[in-house]
Image: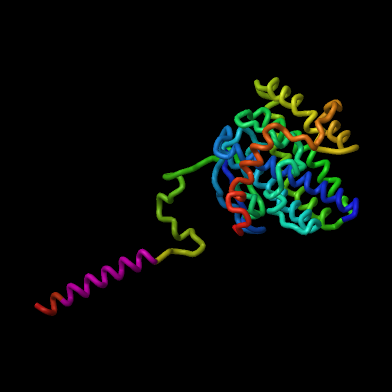
Amino acid sequence: MIWEVFRQEREGAPFQHGGSLEAPNAAFAQAYAIEFYGRRNESTALWIVPREAIREIREPYVAEVFDRDYRRVDGYSIKVKLREARARAGARAGQDRAAGGA
Amino acid sequence: MSAQARSRTDLLLALADDELALGWRNSEWTGIAPFLEEDVAFSSIAQGEIGHARALYELAAADLGTTADELAFDRPPQDYRCAPLVELRFVPDWARTIARHYLYETADAIRIAALAESDRSAIAALATRIEREEVYHRIHADMWAERLRASGERARFEAALAELWPLALGLLAGEQREQLCEAVSREPVEPVERGEHADEWPVLWEEMTMVRRSVPGASW
C-alpha cells in the first residue's frame, strides 16, 4: 500500500509533499514516515495519507477553458497584451523605416 | 573509586555494551531487510542504539578517565559486559530478529525509566534524552510483533520469543525482571545471566574492532 507524506517545515508553514512510501498499514506508514521525514528535526508535523484517498483532478478540468481573467482579484494580466502591442509597434516602426528609406 | 561509583560505572558499561552490540547486530540488516522502507527504518534504529551507546560510554569514560572510543573498541572481548541476547547473530531470520527487538526494547524501557530517576543528574538527563528516541524504537518493535503474531508465521515468532525469553530476563536485574514479565505477559523462568558471552561474541568483537585495531593509536 502506497502512502503520500506531507511535511510542515515549521509551525504555520504550509504542508508540502515530501514523498511517498510503501507500508502494509497505517501504523507502519507512521513509523516509516517518522524515520524518513522527521528523524533529523526537519519537520514539525507530518500528514500521512493513503494514496487512494487522494482524489486527483487533471486537465482539462483544472485549466481555464475560457478567458475569465476579469474574475481574478488582481484583474486582467496585461503582460501578454503588452508584449503583443510591443510586437505590433515594433513591426509598424520597421515598416515605417522601410517605407521612409524607399 | 568508591564501591558505589564502581557499580554505577558497571551499570553504564553494561547498558552501553548492550546498545553497541545490538546496534551492530541490527545494522547487519542494512541492505538486506525484507523491503526498502524497513531497511531504512531498521538501519536508523541500529544507528540510534549506537548513538545511545556513545552517550553512555562518554558518561562512563568521564568517571574512568578514558574516552568513549577506548571503551567501545579497545577493551579485550572478555571485558565487555553485554548480555548474550544482543550478541546472537540472526541474519537472515526476521522472526528471531523481531522477537529480540521486541523483548529488548521492552526491557530497555524499564531500565531507562529507572535511570531517569538516578540521583546523578547527568545520568537522569541522558536517560530522558534516550527515552525520547526509544519511544520510536518501541513503536516499531510493537507494530512488528503485532504483525508477526497476526501472520501465518505466528508459530515461528512465538517459538523465537520462547527461545529468547530467558536471555531477555538476563538483561535486567532485581525487581525489574518482574516488571518485564508483566510487560510482555510471560511467566518468569531461569534467566541467562550477564557475564557469560555467546559463542558468536568473539567473532563480533573481531569485526567490530577490526578497523581500529588495524592502526593502533591512530587518531581518526
For the magenta stretch, what is the residue range? A79-97
Residue at 60% in and 45% down: B210
Q: Relative to B21, does residue A67 appear above or below in the rendering? A: below
The location of residue B52, given as percent across then percent down, is 72, 49
The location of residue B209, given as percent across then percent down, is 63, 46
Residue A51 falls inside the magenta stretch: no
Residue at 63% in and 44% down: B208
Residue at far bottom of view? A100
Front one among B89 and A26: B89
The location of residue B213, given as percent across then percent down, is 61, 49
Front one among A30 and B168: B168
Front one among B100 and A14: B100
Snapshot colouring? rainbow
> Quarter of the image holding residue B15?
top right
Which quadrant is the N terminus of chain B positioned in?
A: bottom right
Residue at far left of view? A102
Main secondary structure type of the part rendered in magenta: helix
Residue A81 falls inside the magenta stretch: yes
Front one among B63 and A59: B63
Residue at 66% in and 41% down: B205
The location of residue B44, given as percent across then percent down, is 63, 45
Which quadrant is the C terminus of chain B positioned in?
A: bottom right
Q: Relative to B73, does residue B99 appear above or below in the rendering? A: above
Q: Relative to A41, does residue A86 appear above or below in the rendering? A: below
Q: How many marks?
A: 0
Task: Evaluate whether residue A34 shows in this view.
Answer: no
> Quarter of the image holding residue A13?
bottom right
Q: Is residue A57 left or right of residue B33?
A: left
Task: Evaluate whether residue B121 shows in this view.
Answer: yes
Residue at 43% in and 45% down: A59
Q: Is residue B160 left or right of residue B11?
A: left
Q: Is residue B209 left or right of residue A94?
A: right
